[in-house]
Image (cartoon, coloured by chain):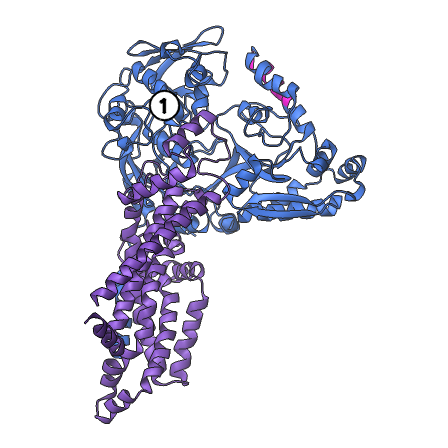
């Protein structure tokens, strides 16, 4: 097991290195620079700005400088918000975004797994069709439509929930979490249904039933563990996707998160910020992929056995 | 199924548990706290560094220059300077500073503060993008360029603690206007030196616990992407007249989101209206809409270097075949006014010439004279704009007008902002959407951008007569009338040559709550926060 983790961690180093290098050179290819504006900057001022960010050095030297700084944990100042270091900005947005992603993931798991299990227990009946149709709707409905729709119904018509903010008023975290989680809940439902259908026809389920176990125990104790494996494998990348993809929800509900920095950095040609957020998110994606692989291994007895054999 | 019920009841419980209390607006009206939609996260708060409109609103609350402006008429009125005299030749200004003007830490604001601040504002390493605001001052530009190294040669001197003498290179009739621009505001020397070198940009001196300011408000709290709060300063010389206790600036992007928050009572003021929602407000809440002319012009730049656009008759034909009235009525919900000049009418009494009008048949004639009867032989023209729904709608309407009236084919090109800027700067375009917003209240800000070597011209158009009128004749004119005459002649030249097409004059348009007082609309969309207050007794009128 330990070896498995170590190998995976070592593998991630060249991956990250490639991400950094590709991002560094690709963003420089985009037309326009961070100091271009409708009102051109006086040449002497522009030279001073470029000198501050070492943009006057040859490209390879900037690259080496950046790598050197990065190894020391310094991502440099943002171009757009020069008063803040990139890691300050990331850390300031991370708590809200991580919390939002976590709640959205919970929504996705709870709603998705319940719907998927319901559907799988009585395939091809109304109990299957209804949740699965809703799930399809959830996948198709974009967050920029679902969000304002929820706001209209629960914020304006019913006046139950605050329509914006994060942690300012009680209940203001509910609508963003549902909005962001909805699409993922739909995926989870479909994956769970598939996994459960697969497992329910296995021999060990028949054995469990033959032992005379009540259906509840068969489903929740025996079947669910195997049936959830595809879902678990999906959750790691999904969480990273939630972190990176929260931009729309953060804008609709005015949440002070990371997503807005991430998207705006690209529009602003904020080189250091683009690099910083990209590196940060790729690290998270690598980490959560590893985590979900470990979880899936732990839940699947066959794989668990193989790994144990390896490490001996 | 059991878990489903638990989950469902949890949701229902938590939903009903949080019925909303007071809105920001209701609470704000009781406690004099103003909630402002401010478009974007401020880049910074250092007056010598920031450039944007949203930053300027915050900086104007935190700092005060030698003078300030009347909130409605925009006439200059005393600020830190109590009074001033101007020499007969218009080149020497002597300001008497208030003895009771104080920094937020209690220090007195002195003439030395201004001298030091302007020295700092002129440091090239600081990256002050508005450094040209200092250039009317004698030797300021040469000091900035390193041709003069001794700052005492620059025309600003502290005669004593409360007397400041400013000598200009040439008489500059709009000089006082520049002193209400944040790039000439004083900054607190000891604070800046505590957190870095004077010419070091973006140090930690603007953080809430560090910042020392001299305006009617001081920095209270700054949470990235969430809000920035300023509170009333107790040391401000006019503190007894300041009625707001706090202003909360929200970095909410304009559009439907901001409007939704306004509707929910979270904001007193939105930085823009949402054009699509305007008809609903006209119908239901007309007293929540504020629309006023704004000193900005929406234009289409023409690349005068392209062979088929070189002939000014082609450019004139393009300009004369746009039906601006219809465009504004149908596409823009009547929000703006047609423009036939670059300077908006009525900028401090200046009336621009009207050189042309909407006249499709004259346009067809001009096009035929240029050798393209009914558009025959004219290659397809590319029209570029930066990504925005509104720019796209306008471009489509104009594309159709040109096609219908002149038989010209137009291809639309939607570009990412930085790509669009790059293509415009390098001349890689045929027609390009553009705009200009006044930096200060004077026609000069709209005209000197078209001189030959201006970086904002970007059309390839140059006319020595125009350059002479704007750069030489107007600044040395003795009276406002003579000066405006030079501007008028210059603008007539400019619009006759039509290096760009004026389309409409901007409006400032906001949703603003009826309880807000002291924010009258004006042509610069300028607010003087020390006059603003909230009417706690305001009640919604019965339906």
Q: Quadrant of the N terminus of chain B?
A: bottom left
Residue B467 lies in quadrant? top right
Q: Position of residue B109 (x, y in %)?
A: 28, 19
Which subunit holds the residue at mark 1?
B
Residue A199 lies in quadrant? bottom left
- Specify whether A106 is left or right of B122: left
Q: Position of residue B352 (x, y in %)?
A: 62, 26
What is the span of residues highlighted in magenta in the rendered image?
B479-490
Which residue is at the front of the view, B267 or A179? A179
Q: Position of residue B198 (x, y in %)?
A: 30, 23
Residue found at x 78% / y 43%: B377
Which residue is at the front of the view, B324 or B130? B130
- Specify whether B380 is left or right of A27: right
In the image as oriented, which residue stretches furthest toward the top? B88
Q: Mark 1 — residue?
A: B185
| SS for dot 1 | loop
Q: Position of residue B5 (x, y in %)?
A: 27, 76
Which residue is at the front of the view, A278 or B32? A278
Which residue is at the front of the view, B248 or B152? B152
* Residue B363 at least partly seen: yes
Magenta stretch, main secondary structure class = helix
Q: Which chain is purple?
A: A
Residue found at x 39% / y 52%: A251
Q: Is residue B19 above or below residue B432?
A: below
């Amino acid at each position: 097991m330990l070896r498995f983790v170590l190998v995976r961690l070592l593998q991630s180093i060249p991956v990250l290195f490639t991400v950094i290098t590709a991002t560094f050179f690709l963003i420089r290819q985009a037309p326009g620079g961070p100091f271009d504006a409708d009102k051109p900057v006086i040449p002497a001022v522009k030279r001073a700005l470029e000198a501050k960010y070492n943009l006057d050095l040859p490209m390879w030297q900037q690259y080496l400088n950046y790598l050197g700084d990065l190894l020391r944990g310094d991502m440099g100042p943002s171009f757009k918000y020069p008063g803040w270091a990139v890691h300050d900005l990331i850390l300031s947005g991370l708590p809200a975004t991580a919390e939002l992603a976590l709640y959205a993931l919970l929504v996705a798991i709870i709603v998705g797994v319940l719907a998927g299990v319901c559907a799988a227990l009585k395939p091809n009946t109304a109990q299957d069709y209804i949740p699965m149709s809703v799930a399809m709707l959830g996948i198709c409905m974009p967050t920029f439509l679902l969000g304002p729709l929820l706001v209209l119904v629960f914020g304006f018509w019913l006046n139950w929930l605050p329509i914006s903010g994060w942690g300012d008023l009680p209940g203001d975290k509910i609508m963003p979490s549902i909005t962001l989680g909805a699409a993922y809940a739909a995926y989870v439902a479909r994956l769970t249904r598939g996994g459960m259908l697969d497992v329910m026809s296995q021999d060990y389920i028949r054995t469990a039933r033959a032992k005379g176990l009540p259906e509840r125990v068969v489903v929740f104790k025996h079947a669910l563990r195997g049936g959830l494996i595809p879902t678990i494998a999906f959750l790691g990348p999904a969480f990273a996707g939630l972190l990176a993809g929260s931009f729309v929800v953060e804008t609709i509900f005015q949440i002070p998160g990371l997503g807005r920095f991430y998207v705006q950095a690209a529009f602003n040609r904020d080189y250091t910020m683009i690099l910083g957020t990209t590196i940060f998110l790729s690290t998270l994606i690598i980490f959560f992929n590893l985590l979900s692989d470990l979880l899936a291994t732990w839940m699947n007895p066959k794989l668990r056995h193989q790994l144990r054999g390896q490490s001996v | 199924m059991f878990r489903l019920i638990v989950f469902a009841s949890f949701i229902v419980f938590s939903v009903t548990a949080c019925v909303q209390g007071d809105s920001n607006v209701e609470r704000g009206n009781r406690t004099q706290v103003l909630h402002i939609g401010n478009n974007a996260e401020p880049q910074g708060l250092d007056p010598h560094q920031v450039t944007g409109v949203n930053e300027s609103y915050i900086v104007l609350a935190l700092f005060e220059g030698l003078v300030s402006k009347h909130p409605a008429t925009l006439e200059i009125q005393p600020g830190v300077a109590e009074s001033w005299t101007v020499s007969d030749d218009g080149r020497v200004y002597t300001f008497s500073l208030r003895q009771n003007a104080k920094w937020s830490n209690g220090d007195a604001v002195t003439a030395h503060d201004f001298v030091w601040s302007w020295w700092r504002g002129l440091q090239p390493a600081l990256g002050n993008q508005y450094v040209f605001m200092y250039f009317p001052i004698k030797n300021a530009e040469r000091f900035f360029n390193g041709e003069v190294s001794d700052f005492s040669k620059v025309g600003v001197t502290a005669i004593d603690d409360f007397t400041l003498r400013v000598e200009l290179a040439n008489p500059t009739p709009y000089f006082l206007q520049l002193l209400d621009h944040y790039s000439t505001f004083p900054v607190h020397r000891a604070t800046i030196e505590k957190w870095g070198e004077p010419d070091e940009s973006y140090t930690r001196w603007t953080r809430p616990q560090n910042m020392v300011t001299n305006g009617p408000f001081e920095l209270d709290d700054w949470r990235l992407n969430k809000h920035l709060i300023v509170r009333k300063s107790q040391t401000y010389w006019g503190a007894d007249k300041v009625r707001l206790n706090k202003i909360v600036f929200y970095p909410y992007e304009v559009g439907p989101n901001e409007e939704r928050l306004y509707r929910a009572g979270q904001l007193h003021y939105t930085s823009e209206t949402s054009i699509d929602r305007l008809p609903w407000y006209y119908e239901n809440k007309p007293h929540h809409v504020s629309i006023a002319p704004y000193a900005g012009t929406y234009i289409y730049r023409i690349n005068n270097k392209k062979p088929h656009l070189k002939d000014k008759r082609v450019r004139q034909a393009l300009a004369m075949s746009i039906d601006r009235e219809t465009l504004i009525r149908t596409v823009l919900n009547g929000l703006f006014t047609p423009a036939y000049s670059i300077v908006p009418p009525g900028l401090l009494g200046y009336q621009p010439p009207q050189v042309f009008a909407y006249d499709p048949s004259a346009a067809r004639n001009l096009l035929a004279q240029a050798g393209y009867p009914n558009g025959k032989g004219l290659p397809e023209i590319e029209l570029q704009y930066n990504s925005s729904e509104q720019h796209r709608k306008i471009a489509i309407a104009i594309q159709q007008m040109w096609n219908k009236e002149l038989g010209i084919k137009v291809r639309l090109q939607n570009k990412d902002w930085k790509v669009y800027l790059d293509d415009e700067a390098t001349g890689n375009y045929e027609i390009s959407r553009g705009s200009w917003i006044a930096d200060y209240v004077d026609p000069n800000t709209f005209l000197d951008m078209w001189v030959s070597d201006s970086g904002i011209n970007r059309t390839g158009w140059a006319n020595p007569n125009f350059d002479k009128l704007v750069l030489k004749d107007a600044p040395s004119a003795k009276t406002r009338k003579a000066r405006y005459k030079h501007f008028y002649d210059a603008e007539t030249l400019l619009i006759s040559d039509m290096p760009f097409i004026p389309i409409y004059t901007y409006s400032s348009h906001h949703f603003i709550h009826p309880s807000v007082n002291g924010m009258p609309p004006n042509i610069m969309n300028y607010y003087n926060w020390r006059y603003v207050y909230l009417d706690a007794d305001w009640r919604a009128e019965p339906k």
